[in-house]
Image (cartoon, coloured by chain):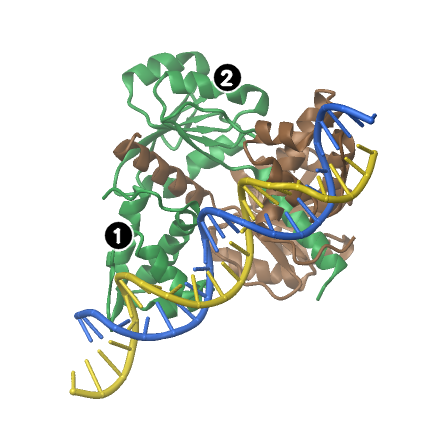
Chain colours: A brown, B green, C blue, D yellow
DNA sequence: TAGATTGTTAATCGATTAACAATC
DNA sequence: TAGATTGTTAATCGATTAACAATC
């Protein structure tokens, strides 16, 4: 299943499809048509069919889509059928918040360790995952195969820490620091820039105030 | 300054421009051309000029853009010249993380209160902002003018809480619950769906593994 | 079979890039 | 003035929507 040249716009929508299908599944909905799903999600049915057909024909004419099957298949496309190991760098509030999301584990992201520089946190555990000191990182990653690192540290330390992680074999960085990381080929990243998100909210709010339609 | 019909794609890029210009400003860079900025940001110069000209001509032929001026102007477009009051609903790790970001205050988002249902947190303060109980919400919002609410509560309680907030006059919801809120006209929202972000990272990682180019 | 709905091609729409005249 | 770089129009590219034949 090698899907090449899928547009970023499509990829960005997949997790949302996955979420809606998961909810349908919880509500014991067995089948759904692109039309019905499009109404729930406020997108066009055409877009749903077009998006899905990038990856294969998951539906059946005259019937629609089997919810459970489609959910599983989108999961596979997103790599949720695999288990990935993850560490969190930075055990502040945000790092601890991530560590407490048991939902990630259910999607195949297994938390292996949390690292921080603050000696007060040494030995503390969050949901059975121990907080270690940053100087233990090299040893830990030599002993444990880890693919993903969540970076929840200050901006000033982010680039050098990212480099250090890449050197130790980390292949994916989930970056919460408000900066763009410059990573070598073969290492992927995804940014969560909260302050940019808040600014977009601010823009929308300001626009509504000025021109409430 | 009523900018109508600006495309969402442009809006999404504005905070990133703002961030880069802020960094240039910190480094005492006085002027920058679209070409130079485009190289730093890995976008086309054409796109930068096109984006900015949606809002007005901020540059000068033969010179480029004055960094400080452009930074200020984009700030105004995003509404960062105004002060907005914010509350946080949900004082878990994520809510506390947001409460600790002093950076938001500097952008004009003033934290007025934090609310939770857990009585253990009653009276606790985070950076001088008190945690109150959810049943105090009505009274608090009658006494205080608040525009923005950050929702860091479980998905199951998000829709009803959003409705409650809207009824109390909240105009913007920064939603961290993994669900889409259905809000009335005039109320805006911005989603931060961490698990969707992680799934996109997973997709990229999986793709790289299968086809490392 | 008839009805429904997909998969897919073609048409439209919008966003990005290129080009260049205007002008500092 | 000459050089640089914007603001803006025109060209290209890509993404979305519409339409419909295929088929369950």
Which chain is disc 1 placed on? B
Mark 2 crowdedness (10 Å alpha carbons): few <14, some 14-19, many ≥20: few
Residue B181 visible from this viewpoint: yes
Instruction: State the image coordinates of residue A80 (x, y, percent, origin top left).
Output: 73, 42
Instruction: Say what secondary structure mark 1 lies in.
Output: helix
Report whether residue A132 is seen. Answer: no
Name the element at disc 2: helix
Q: With A117 as the anchor, is B18 left or right in this view?
A: left
Check residue B72 in the rendering and tell me which mark sits there, or answer none: 1
Distance of label 1 from label 2 (alpha carbons): 38 Å
Position of B112 relative to A89 (above/below): above
Quadrant of residue A106 within the rendered picture: top right
Kindly identify which numbered label has been placed on residue A67: none
Judging depth in this view, the residue of C7 and A90 nearest the camera is C7
Chain letter of mark 2 equals: B
Q: Position of residue A161 (x, y in %)?
A: 57, 58
Q: In the picture, residue A78 is in which quadrant?
A: top right
- Number of numbered tags placed on the structure image: 2
From the viewer's perspective, is residue A140 above or below residue B142? below
Residue at x 34%, y 20% (from the top left corner): B169
> x, y (%) of residue A183?
58, 63
Residue at numbered disc 2 = B160
């Amino acid at each position: 299943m090698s899907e090449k040249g899928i547009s970023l716009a499509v990829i960005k929508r997949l997790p949302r499809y996955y979420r809606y299908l998961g909810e349908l599944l919880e509500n014991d909905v067995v089948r759904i048509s692109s039309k019905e799903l499009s109404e729930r999600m406020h997108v066009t049915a055409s877009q749903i069919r077009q998006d899905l057909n990038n990856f294969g024909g998951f539906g059946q004419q005259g019937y629609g889509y089997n919810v459970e099957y489609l959910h599983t298949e989108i999961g596979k496309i997103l790599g949720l059928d695999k288990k990935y190991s993850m560490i969190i760098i930075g055990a502040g509030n945000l790092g601890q918040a991530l560590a407490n999301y048991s939902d990630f584990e259910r999607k195949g992201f297994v938390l292996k360790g949390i690292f921080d520089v603050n000696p007060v946190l040494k030995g503390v555990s969050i949901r059975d995952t121990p907080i270690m000191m940053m100087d233990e990182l090299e040893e830990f990653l030599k002993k444990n195969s880890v693919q993903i690192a969540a970076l929840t540290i200050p901006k000033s330390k982010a680039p050098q820490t990212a480099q250090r992680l890449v050197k130790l074999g980390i292949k994916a960085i989930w970056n919460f620091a408000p900066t763009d990381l410059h990573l070598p080929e073969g290492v992927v990243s995804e940014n969560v820039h909260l302050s940019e998100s808040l600014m977009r909210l601010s823009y929308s709010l300001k626009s509504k105030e000025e021109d409430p339609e």
